[in-house]
Image (spheres, rainbow, N blue to C red):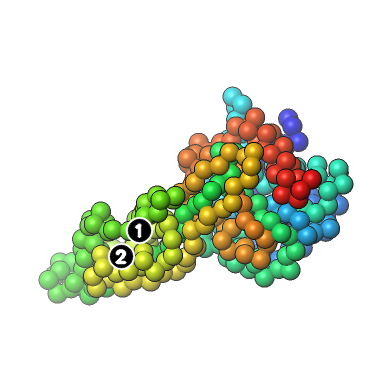
């Protein structure tokens, strides 16, 4: 196996679902120390933290996240692909970044930092805290599966929580209660009536009804119901919020647990580019320099049982990261 494939397999083999990243954080921190980097682990919450590795600083930071969505899927190599949870999103990317940065350092280019954050898959608490570190880089290359293209833009994310309330009663006398689930169901069945903003580069905003919870038993009229939605926004949050409030029309309580804005990225000559529909931590790392977005793998297989990255693409990404860093630094 190549160096990057070996490292990617090691990382994929360590379970690191969001909020349980401690083992992979420790593994990455120890690895980078052994390679001669000055490493800071910034605690985000007990037992988990961001990993910042630096040498000279003042140049380019390569950054991605170490957490994954559930469930854990162990690595396997088959038919020219590395399979497993995080192979594409984003442990394969982390391995390519570490390999590229090490190659650059060995060649004397020490103006490269590495930043690996936790929590990206649910709330981005790692990136929000990492933005308070004393970063010195002029450029941030964030890593997400972009099919080995630079991104010219990516959508933002607005989490929406809807809550309806009813009155509990014994189900044998349901007329004495008031269901909280039925009005929520009526609202969600009208989701196709939600009119959200669009953008000429990023396309249409989209909405996904991700979870719904309500009631405590089949023999109890439910007193509460919650639904969580994810809106992929193409601009600021306020127009999307206004559209949501018109759609709900007072039939449910609305809150917005988190928001990550959409972004437009610069193009770099010699690197193919296109827009992507997902959201990244780049917009939360404003102190780390001008942002770009690049990574091997495809978002279309991320978060699926068959997640994978092509091994040839993973190997090529190491060379691309090296070339991109050198281009950004002018050498």
Percent x, y for residue 151? 55, 47
Q: Quadrant of the C terminus?
A: top right
Q: Which element is circle 2 on?
A: helix
Query: Which residue is depicted at the point 64% across and 58% down?
Result: 290
Residue 273 image-quadrant placement: top right
Are circles 1 and 2 on residues that touch, CB within 8 Å?
yes
Query: Which residue is depicted at the point 74% across and 68% down?
Result: 134
* Residue to which mark 2 is pinned: 243
Q: Nearer the viewer, residue 33 or 268?
A: 268
Quote the CA–CA distance across marks 1 and 2. Answer: 8 Å
Percent x, y for residue 8? 68, 40
Percent x, y for residue 326? 76, 45
Question: How many labels sit on residues?
Answer: 2
Taking the image as shown, residue 317 lies to the left or right of residue 72, namely right
Q: Residues within 10 Å of mark 2 (few under 14, many from 20)?
A: some
Q: Nearer the viewer, residue 169 or 264?
A: 264
* Residue to which mark 1 is pinned: 197
Query: Which residue is depicted at the point 73% across and 60% down?
Result: 137
Q: Nearer the viewer, residue 326 or 259?
A: 326
Please tell me whether residue 92 is drawn above or below residue 218 in the rendered image: above
Q: Is residue 7 visible?
A: no
Q: Quadrant of the N terminus?
A: top right
First in residue order: circle 1 vs circle 2:
1
Q: Which element is circle 1 on?
A: loop
Q: Is residue 217 visible?
A: yes
Q: Which mark is residue 322?
A: none
Q: Nearer the viewer, mark 1 or mark 2?
A: 1
Residue 291 image-quadrant placement: bottom right
């Amino acid at each position: 196996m190549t160096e990057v494939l070996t490292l990617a397999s090691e990382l994929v083999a360590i379970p690191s679902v969001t909020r349980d990243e401690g083992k992979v954080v420790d593994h990455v921190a120890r690895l980078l120390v052994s390679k001669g980097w000055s490493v800071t682990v910034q605690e985000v919450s007990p037992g988990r933290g961001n990993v910042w590795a630096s040498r000279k600083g003042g140049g380019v930071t390569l950054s991605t996240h170490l957490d994954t969505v559930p469930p854990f899927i162990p690595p396997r190599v088959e038919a020219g692909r590395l399979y497993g949870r995080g192979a594409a999103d984003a442990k394969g990317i982390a391995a390519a970044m570490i390999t590229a940065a090490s190659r650059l350092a060995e060649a004397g280019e020490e103006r490269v930092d590495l930043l690996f954050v936790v929590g990206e898959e649910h709330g981005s608490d790692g990136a929000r805290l990492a933005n308070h570190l004393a970063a010195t880089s002029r450029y941030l290359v964030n890593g997400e599966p972009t099919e080995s293209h630079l991104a010219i833009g990516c959508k933002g994310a607005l989490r929406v929580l809807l809550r309806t309330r009813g009155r509990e009663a014994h189900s044998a006398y349901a007329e004495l209660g008031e269901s909280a689930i039925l009005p929520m169901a009526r609202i969600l069945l009208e989701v196709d009536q939600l009119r959200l903003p669009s953008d000429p580069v990023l396309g249409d905003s989209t909405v996904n009804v991700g979870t719904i919870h309500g009631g405590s038993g089949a023999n109890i009229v439910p007193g509460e119901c919650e639904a969580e939605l994810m809106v992929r926004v193409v601009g600021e949050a306020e127009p999307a919020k206004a559209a949501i409030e018109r759609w709900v029309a007072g039939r449910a309580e609305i809150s917005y647990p988190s928001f990550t804005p959409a972004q437009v990225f610069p193009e770099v000559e010699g690197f193919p580019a296109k827009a992507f529909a997902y959201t990244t931590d780049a917009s939360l790392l404003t102190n780390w320099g001008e942002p770009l977005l690049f990574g091997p793998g495809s978002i279309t297989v991320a978060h699926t049982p068959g997640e994978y990255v092509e091994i040839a693409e993973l190997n090529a990404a190491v060379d691309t990261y090296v070339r991109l860093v050198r281009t950004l630094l002018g050498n």
